[in-house]
Image (cartoon, rainbow, N blue to C red):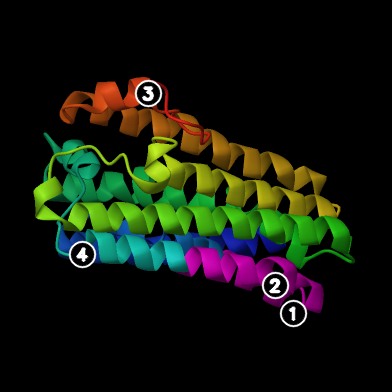
Amino acid sequence: MAFLWGLLASLVLMTLVWAGSVWRHDASLVDRFWGLGFVVVTLVWWGLAGWPLQGLWIVIPVLVWGLRLSLFITWRNWGHGEDGRYTDMREGLSDRAFAARSLVTIFWLQGALVAVIGLPMLAVTNAASIGWPLAALGVAVWALGTLYETVADAQMARFRADPARRGKVMDQGLWRYSRHPNYFGEIVVWVGYGLLALAAGGWWAVPSAILMIVLILRVSGVTLLEKRLHASRPGYAEYARRTNTLIPGPPRA
């Protein structure tokens, strides 16, 4: 039953975001609320469980990670208009037709994914007890991933802010050792959430963390971005030849 309340909260949030996207003519608003969606469902599940103290093992990490992600994407996308992924989806559709379709295929879909992928949060917030050594390991892994992702995002933001580097390939800092250090950090974050679920006895929630990792690797993250960068960025093929895709490692000669 708790899961359904979290799902409902996520769908309500995404419906409100959808209404804003129709008004602003910008479906990429959904990206700004992805991280916040996990914050909402986590707080709902924690509240339904009676705010148990052990829930803080995952509530605090989700608050930090989710708010940082939403604030960063909001800042990064501010003033840039709708993302190309969504403008492509608008082709051949009237505004009304796209609004109706996007409600289901973008906003409600992501709202449902937040609840399903967020099952580690449900497992921990509703656990009768938590094995603290494994939970401490999970938080340590989460912290490492969050720090890595934050540094990678900051480095890329500084690179993009320099007009002299426009159109060039970022190959400095963490980006020297892998082509997608931000996604690597995100994957490490979800490994941490999976460990926290196991610490709470929530083995059934681990596949949700794995699903998130698969989405990052094969659906909305690495694979999609690689295709776009190879097609649009001169010099990217050479960068790809000498640099690992995801796991950091020394550049190849």
Q: Residue at x 38, y 48 (%)?
A: 173
Residue identified by numbered label 2: 46
Q: Element under label 4? A: loop
Horizontally, is 64 left or right of 75 in the view? right
Q: Are marks 1 and 4 in contact (CB under 8 Å)?
A: no
Horizontally, is 129 left or right of 63 in the view? right
Considering the image in quadrants, where does the C terminus appear? top left
Residue identified by numbered label 3: 242
Q: CA distance from mark 1 to mark 3?
A: 49 Å
Q: Element under label 3? A: helix
The vertical placement of 85 against 110, above or below, is above
Rate crowding at label 2 as few (under 14), some (14 to 19) or many (20 or more) other CA atoms within 10 Å: many
Q: Which residues are magenta?
A: 40-67
x, y (%) of residue 206?
72, 43
Amino acid carrying label 3: it is Arg
Residue identified by numbered label 1: 51
Horizontally, is 154 left or right of 62 in the view? left
Amino acid carrying label 4: it is Trp
Residue identified by numbered label 4: 78
